[in-house]
Image (tube, rainbow, N blue to C red):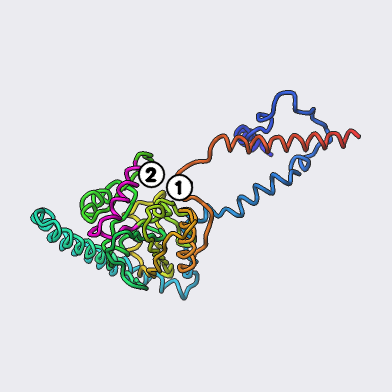
Amino acid sequence: MNTRDLKLSSELDLDRPNPEDYLPSGSIPESHPKLRLSDLLDISPALTEAAGAIVDDSFTRCFKSNPPEPWNWNVYLFPLWCCGVVIRYGILFPVSVLVLTIGWIIFLLCYIPVHFLLKGNEKLRKRLERCLVELICSFFVASWTGVVKYHGPRPSRRPQQVFVANHTSMIDFIILEQMTAFSVIMQKHPGWVGLVQSTILESVGCIWFNRTEAKDREIVARKLRAHVQGADNNPLLIFPEGTCVNNHYTVMFKKGAFELGCTVCPIAIKYNKIFVDAFWNSRKQSFSTHLLQLMTSWAVVCDVWYLEPQTLRPGETPIEFAERVRDIITARAGLKKVPWDGYLKYSRPNPKFTERKQQIFAESVMQHLEERSKQIRR
């Protein structure tokens, strides 16, 4: 080993945690010359637990985008792949931009006069704004070459009902909105998406919140209860997972939608990844980049199932009700159910929990070393 390697090794050793730091003074046995590295590594329980956490990390898998298998790996398929890139970026993408641009022009030319000139006729204004929001969502789906198949009866406006769906991307809302103008509960976003939320979508009764603000939960809960009581309000849509999941799994449903005392109508959404992965990882890409990815793909293929309405059974808690509805959606969409809270995606483990695990590991190492030392002395 040369001098450079020795220096690099010593620098790396400085960053490694020392098990002795987590033990009280005087508890460390004297080193024995016959102890080997294998003695230190023979700590099966700790290693088994660590290996199991790495192999069976079902939480991280819920929020990872799985890239498709490469198929342009030989001389026969590569020219076809190149032709596809030219068609998608040189022909389909400009057409998609043109479709979306025309859609926005038509929408704004109609929405602005309706919103400002019909304030005296609230009922007519709401009906026209609802139709216009459905129209612009249809243009969005068309710009992705969307192929969406809807199963079941179309949702209707009734009091005392709420719709819940699994969540893969913000385009879930757009796909559902083009058929029915829902009032959605959604995280407040920055940029142009936030501008659309606070202006256009505000007109259809959407409710926004910030998951980092604790007081927003109480405000949203009050708005939810008031919304489901109105007969003329748009159907209420909630994504109870609270975050985007990669359409392979479903995480725990928040109980807020299930303690309103009204009928819950499940909606199952399943994307076919043959052309593009519709999962939006908001921590790695902006929504604009996500839209660009969809618009440069061949098509967004999706199935939507409007399932049988469910009510709270006698003796059933809201949490049990939420799990029962999640089972229905998971089975219909062919997803896998995992026992995780999606909000853990936005938080770090408690430092006390990490330190306790480190202390347990250090104690197991030192105990094993002490036992080996006694065996050698005998």
Q: How far across and how far down the image is residue 27, in percent?
A: 75, 27
Residue 229 within the segment the image draws in magenta = yes
Disc on the earlier residue, 1 or 2: 2
Q: How far across and how far down the image is residue 12, in percent?
A: 61, 36
In this rendering, position of residue 377 left or right of residue 52:
right
Q: How far across and how far down the image is residue 156, in percent?
A: 28, 66
Q: Secondary structure at mark 2?
A: loop
The magenta stretch is 216-237
Examine the rendering and report whether any part of residue 318 can be seen. Answer: yes
In this rendering, position of residue 18 left or right of residue 89:
right
Query: Residue visible at 66% across and 32% down?
Result: 18
Residue 211 image label: 2
Query: Residue visible at 69% across and 35% down?
Result: 362
Q: Quadrant of residue 20?
A: top right
Residue 343 image label: 1
Residue 231 image label: none
Examine the rendering and report whether any part of residue 3 can be seen. Answer: no
Disc 1 marks which amino acid?
A: Tyr
For the residue carrying disc 1, how many other residues have a C-alpha within 10 Å: few (<14), some (14-19), or many (20+)?
some
Q: Nearer the viewer, residue 158 or 361?
A: 158
Q: Quadrant of residue 159?
A: bottom left
Residue 267 within the segment the image draws in magenta = no
Q: Majority secondary structure of the magenta segment?
A: helix
In this rendering, position of residue 202 left or right of residue 148:
left
Query: Residue visible at 39% across and 62% down?
Result: 278
Residues tagged 1 and 2 counted as in contact (Cβ below 8 A): yes
Give the vertical position of 121 relative to 151 (above or below): above
